[in-house]
Image (cartoon, helix red, strand yellow):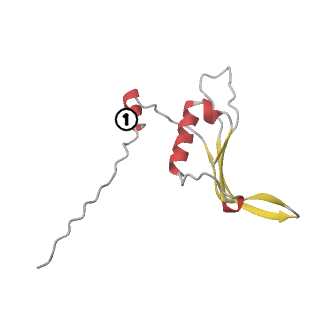
Amino acid sequence: MVFNGPLFDMHPRYMQFKNLMLDFFRGQLVESMEIEGLQHVISISAGEQVQDPTSTKEHLPTILFRVYIIRSKRVAEKVRIELEEMGPRMDLKLDRWQEASEEMMSMALRKPKDTAVRFSAVLVANE
C-alpha cells in the first residue's frame, strides 16, 4: 500500500483516512520479501491543498484510489517491473466529518492487552 501526497501525514482528515485504509487492508507483517512475492499494489494519492482566499470553506483535493497488478519481466540480467491497472478504481471526495471527543478517541485507540490462552488437560481413567 502506497500513500502519495503530503496531506496523508499533515492534515487530520487525511491522516484518519490513511489509518482507516491501513486497518482495513492490514495483512501479515513480514521482515523481508523477494520481488517475485509481490503481486498487487494499492496506490492512494491526493494532490496539494489549494487555499482560496475568497472562500471560508476548506477545499480538499480528491483522493485517487487505484489497484495495480505487478508484472515482472527479466530483461538480460535485470528485472523490469511494470504496473498494470486491474481495479477497483475510485475517486473519493472527503465531505462531512465529525471529530470524536477526546475521551472517545482514547477509547478507540486503546490496544488490548496480550492475553495468553491456557489449556489444561484433565485425563480421566476409564474403569
Q: Is residue 104 left or right of residue 21?
A: left
**Outermost residue, right side:** 76
- The answer to which quarter of the image holds residue 18 is top right
Q: Residue drawn at (70%, 62%), measured in percent from left and top?
A: 36
Camera-side residue of 89 and 22: 22
Looking at the picture, how far across and down is residue 56, in whole percent? 60, 22
**Outermost residue, bottom side:** 127
Looking at the picture, how far across and down is residue 106, in whole percent? 40, 32
Callout 1: few (<14), some (14-19), or many (20+) C-alpha neighbours within 10 Å? few
The number of callouts visible is 1
Depicted 59 relative to depicted 64: above or below: above
Secondary element type, mark 1:
helix
Q: Amino acid at mark 1?
A: Met
Q: Is residue 13 left or right of residue 111?
A: right
Camera-side residue of 126 and 112: 126
Depicted 75 relative to depicted 66: above or below: below
Camera-side residue of 22 and 126: 126
Q: Is residue 68 left or right of residue 23?
A: right
- The answer to which quarter of the image holds residue 127 is bottom left
Q: Residue drawn at (51%, 43%), measured in percent from left and top?
A: 20
Q: Which residue is mark 1?
A: 107
Looking at the picture, how far across and down is residue 27, in whole percent? 54, 54
Camera-side residue of 108 and 95: 108
Q: Is residue 59 left or right of residue 99?
A: right
**Outermost residue, top side:** 53
Q: Residue drawn at (78%, 58%), measured in percent from left and top?
A: 81
Looking at the picture, how far across and down is residue 74, in whole percent? 82, 64
